[in-house]
Amino acid sequence: MTLPFTFTNKLSFNCSGPGYNSPVLIRVDATKEVALGHLRRCISLACKFKEKGVNVLFLTSSDDFAERFLGKSGFNFISVDSAVNSGNDCDFALKTAERIDAKIIVIDSYEIDEIYRKRLMNSGLFVISIDDMADRSIPSHLIINGNLNAENLRFANAGKVSMCLGIRYLILGPDFWNPGRAANTDNFDNVLITMGGIDHYDLTSKILSVLDKFDFDFDVTAIIGPYYDNLDSIKMQAGGMKKKVDLVDSPPSLFPYMRKCSMAFSAGGQTLYELAALGRPTIGITVWENQAGNVSELSRMEAIIGITYKEGKGFSVMLGKSTRRLIYDKTERQRLSSISSSLVDGKGAERACKAIFESYKKWNSKDCRTRIYD
């Protein structure tokens, strides 16, 4: 639902959380430019809030798929026509927090700048930033970065903000909270391809082309994200292949497809960690700068085979060599599966939720709400 800036109805929430009895407001977007990762992560955190008896309201820029995705999640949301960090966006966030009596706001967006965050803090809100980068100052009361390399990053405002860093705070969805034992890698019958919400470089088609060259009996499942503009290319490639290819359009969860696969190709976002939690041997591909740390660190620990996308034939050659390594070497698949599943225990959302409420309680007890963040 898209609402005007002036509220006409009163939202009512009943909360019974751990020492916190107000809703949590989450400001996050899913668009063609930023894809799905931020929204999926915040919905996962919201599921943990809900489990603790705390209600959540999402505030998001208007986007057809984001609204459908949130609608299916069951969480309350308000969508606004303005882009994040533009126009009256901050005013709307403040007004929304006041309307529902939220004391905590979670932000998951690279686009929200220092001025916006400081305004939220000066209004008396407890500001939590979920962020994957350390390339700028992020005024907040608490920063959460659950990536494997987070503890090695140098934050511009280190020492001035509480931090939850590293894979112990990796926020995954409920399907991955108790991932169980690593995969059985003896059989090889299905390959999963998932490049996230958008496939800018048509990597799905390139991977399909490489897979079709292998004289090995397996099927392929390719996930089609909601913002893909290369669907015709993928269909053309899949239609001419000897192997069976199942194209799956924007499923509500990747979990069943991950469980089914013998190996996977994934872009370098959160999906890499989900595959790791299930022990699926994976070729991780760095597509964007904010994915480089995930791929390089998981590769360094020999939990995945990591490569970086570059234009030219060299990428396809590297892709082919890496693929051959996993298809024909059961021992290698077993090794990757064992290492990757040992890294991700699925309890990051629980730890993050606990840290949020403990930090809020400590901050609130010191009566810091009137502090001016200049």
Image (spheres, rainbow, N blue to C red):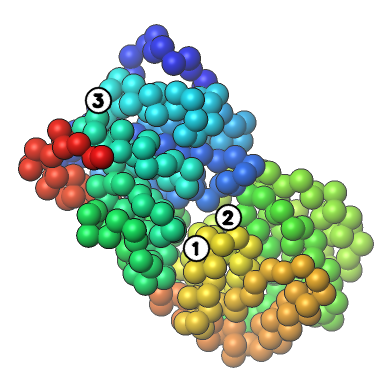
User: First in sequence: mark 1 or mark 2?
Assistant: 2
SS category of the residue bearing label 2: loop
Q: Residue at x 77, y 58 (%)?
A: 202
Q: Which mark is residue 274?
A: 1
Foreground tag (3 vs 1): 3
User: Cβ–Cβ below 8 Å for labels 2 and 3?
Assistant: no
Tell me, yes or no, if residue 56 can be seen here: no
Residue 12 image point, x, y percent: 30, 20
76 above or below 341? above
User: First in sequence: mark 2 or mark 3?
Assistant: 3
Q: Amino acid at mark 2?
A: Leu
Distance between mark 2 and mark 3 Cα atoms: 35 Å
Label 3 crowd (10 A; few <14 / some 14-19 / many >=20): some
Q: Residue at x 53, y 26 (%)?
A: 82
Q: Is residue 8 left or right of residue 86?
A: left
Q: Which mark is residue 101?
A: 3
131 above or below 76? below
